[in-house]
Structures are given as structure tokens and as C-alpha cells.
């Protein structure tokens, strides 16, 4: 009997994933348009995050990528063989932004209190942030899915990679080693054990990379507006639980949420990362501005520290 129920849950989870993939494919054109709209509302007046200083030093030549501006081509180097090359400076080559949009089943939750699901909001913010960063001269990639790119059609590249990704949709990114000068943006509901969150932040920050963790939640996940007999179904195949009087659970539930968030905040503070909470009933542009501002602060800190390090030997002399 128990085995039969487990099989039913597993079958239901597979069907839910298939339906979810189809819905996402149908919604993707709308999400891309929304991301471009959000990006355009905040991009005017924002300045690129490149700075003078160590970034003036030559780093390397790399192959020209289709979609990049033609003025990036170094024609003198390209004339030596049959390929086009771009001359990269140290800052440009080193500074990449990795954006992780959580696409796990729990992200499809959408209550009557918000227009968008957590997944839809996450993708809109991820795409819009990528657009803003590329406009500012940065390179953007999705861990395990896309290589860092400064292409003007970065949104389409990200969307295509997401739609054709056959792997299991995990809440947190796969293990990878971001460079010390790169930044990592995690967009997730973070409804996973704290040990997993701590382990991932520890692993990603070990190289010295800066990071920004954003918990994206539906307003109902904070207010717990349920009463009476309610069945709560775990979207990732762990079964269900029924509350006879759901309102009696509210205080304990909210206390658990606050403890979880406090633990995440303590971990990000320890690593020098930032932590933010974004509700899906708030404008996407609000989160985009916060992220861009925090990332700009990290860039200025990096440049200041490098200038100080460069000046130290001379001062000592």
C-alpha cells in the first residue's frame, strides 16, 4: 500500500514537471518581453560598472562571439589568421556575473495574492539583470547552462538554454569555481535545508567571489493566510499534510520562516555576501535596482582595494 502511494506520488511529480515545462515554454515569450520592459525602466541613468585602474592592463585575446558589437574586434590581431579576435583588458576578462534562477518545482507556486509565480518573477529578474549588466559591459552566464557572454541577445540565449535543459531542476546551482573577481547572484525561494544553503554559499565564496542571495517568495508564504481544513501538497514529491485548523499553525510557521532567514542572513554576513527578500507582489524593478546598487558597491570596493595594494610598495619605499 505504501509502495503504491509512493509510486503515485512519483508519477504525479513527473506529470507535474512535464506540464510545468510546457507552461514555461508557452510563457517564455511574455517573460522575455516583460524582462526587457523592466530593464528599460531602470537602465536609463545607470552607468556601467567598469572602472579605470587595473582594468587598463591588457589581459588576453579571445575569439569574437556572434552578436557582440563590431567595435569590439581587434582588427590588427584578427588580420593574422582567419578568425576575429577581441582584445580583453584585465578587468573585463576577470569580471563575470553568474546568475542562478531556481527552477525547482516549488518555484511554480502562485497564490491569489500575487500575479506572477515565483518562477516567472525569478526569470524576469534574471533576464532583466542580465540585460542591464551586458549593457554596462559585463559578461553574464548561468552556472552549468551557459558560458559567460556579453552578447546583445543574452536574454534569448539564457531562455533557450533553460528551455532545452534536460537535467533535474535543482534549487541551488551545481558546484563550480567562480573566479575571485566574479559575482554570483542566487535567485531562489531557498526552501531547502539550511545545511544545503550553508554548504553552497561556503563553496562558492571559497574563491573570494562576491555574492548576492535573494529569497523570492509568494506573499502567502509569509502571511500564511489559511484557515480551516487545508491540505498542503509538497511540490517536489515529498507527499502532503492536512491541517484541521490551519490558522492554528500560523504562529509556529512564521517563527520557523524567521529562524530560517536569520540563519541565511548570518551565513551571508559571515562570507561578506548580501541577502535580500523579494515578494512577488512587489515590482520586479524594485529588486533589479537593489541588486544593481549592491553589485556596484562591490565593484568600487574591489577597485579601491587594488589601488591601495598597488600604492603600498611605493609608499613603503
Image: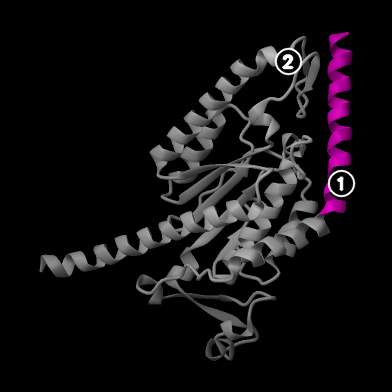
As helix, strand or loop, the secondary structure at mark 2 comes to helix
> Crowding at label 1, few (<14), some or many (≥20) Cα neighbours within 10 Å?
few
Inspect this view and state whether residue 147 appears: no
Is tag 1's residue or tag 2's residue first in the polypeptide sequence? Answer: 1
Q: Nearer the viewer, residue 250 or 17?
A: 250
Q: In which quarter of the image is the N terminus?
A: top right
Inspect this view and state whether residue 241 appears: yes
Pinpoint residue 306: horizontal percent, then vertical percent: 31, 63
Say left or right for 175 vs 51: right
Check if residue 104 falls in the magenta segment: no
Magenta range: 1-27
**As drawn, 224 above or below 121:** above
Pinpoint residue 199: horizontal percent, then vertical percent: 51, 34
The disc placed on residue 23 is 1
The disc placed on residue 141 is none
As helix, strand or loop, the secondary structure at mark 1 comes to helix
Say left or right for 266 vs 108: left
Q: Can you identify the residue that label 2 sits on?
A: 246
The residue sitting at 30% across, 60% down in the picture is 305
Pinpoint residue 283: horizontal percent, then vertical percent: 66, 51
| Mark 1–mark 2 distance (CA, rounded to whole Å) | 30 Å
Q: Which of 225 and 294 is in front in this view?
A: 225
Q: Nearer the viewer, residue 199 or 61?
A: 199
Check if residue 18 falls in the magenta segment: yes
The residue sitting at 51% across, 47% down in the picture is 212
**As drawn, 270 above or below 71:** above
Amino acid at each position: 500500500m505504501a509502495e503504491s502511494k509512493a509510486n503515485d506520488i512519483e508519477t504525479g511529480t513527473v506529470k507535474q514537471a512535464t506540464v510545468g515545462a510546457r507552461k514555461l515554454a508557452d510563457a517564455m515569450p511574455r517573460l522575455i518581453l516583460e524582462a526587457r520592459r523592466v530593464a528599460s525602466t531602470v537602465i536609463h541613468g545607470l552607468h556601467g560598472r567598469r572602472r579605470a585602474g587595473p582594468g587598463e592592463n591588457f589581459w588576453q585575446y579571445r575569439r569574437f562571439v556572434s552578436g557582440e558589437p563590431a567595435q569590439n574586434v581587434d582588427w590588427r590581431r584578427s588580420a593574422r589568421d582567419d578568425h576575429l579576435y577581441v582584445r580583453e583588458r584585465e578587468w573585463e576578462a576577470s569580471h563575470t556575473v553568474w546568475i542562478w534562477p531556481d527552477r525547482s518545482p516549488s518555484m511554480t507556486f502562485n497564490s491569489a495574492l500575487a500575479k506572477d509565480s515565483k518562477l516567472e518573477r525569478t526569470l524576469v529578474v534574471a533576464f532583466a539583470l542580465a540585460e542591464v549588466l551586458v549593457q554596462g559591459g559585463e559578461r553574464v552566464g548561468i552556472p552549468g547552462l551557459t558560458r559567460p557572454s556579453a552578447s546583445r541577445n543574452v536574454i534569448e540565449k539564457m531562455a533557450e538554454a533553460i528551455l532545452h535543459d534536460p537535467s533535474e531542476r535543482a534549487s541551488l546551482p551545481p558546484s563550480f569555481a567562480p573566479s575571485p573577481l566574479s559575482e554570483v547572484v542566487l535567485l531562489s525561494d531557498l526552501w531547502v535545508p539550511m545545511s544545503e544553503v550553508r554548504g553552497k554559499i561556503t563553496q562558492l565564496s571559497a574563491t573570494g567571489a562576491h555574492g548576492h542571495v535573494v529569497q523570492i517568495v509568494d506573499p502567502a508564504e509569509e502571511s500564511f493566510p489559511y484557515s480551516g481544513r487545508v491540505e498542503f501538497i509538497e511540490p517536489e514529491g515529498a507527499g502532503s499534510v492536512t491541517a484541521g485548523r490551519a490558522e492554528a499553525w500560523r504562529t509556529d510557521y512564521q517563527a520557523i520562516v524567521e529562524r530560517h532567514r536569520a540563519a541565511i542572513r548570518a551565513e551571508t554576513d559571515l562570507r561578506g555576501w548580501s541577502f535580500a527578500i523579494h515578494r512577488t507582489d512587489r515590482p520586479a524593478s524594485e529588486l533589479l535596482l537593489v541588486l544593481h546598487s549592491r553589485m556596484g558597491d562591490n565593484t568600487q570596493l574591489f577597485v579601491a582595494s587594488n589601488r591601495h595594494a598597488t600604492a603600498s610598495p611605493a609608499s613603503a619605499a
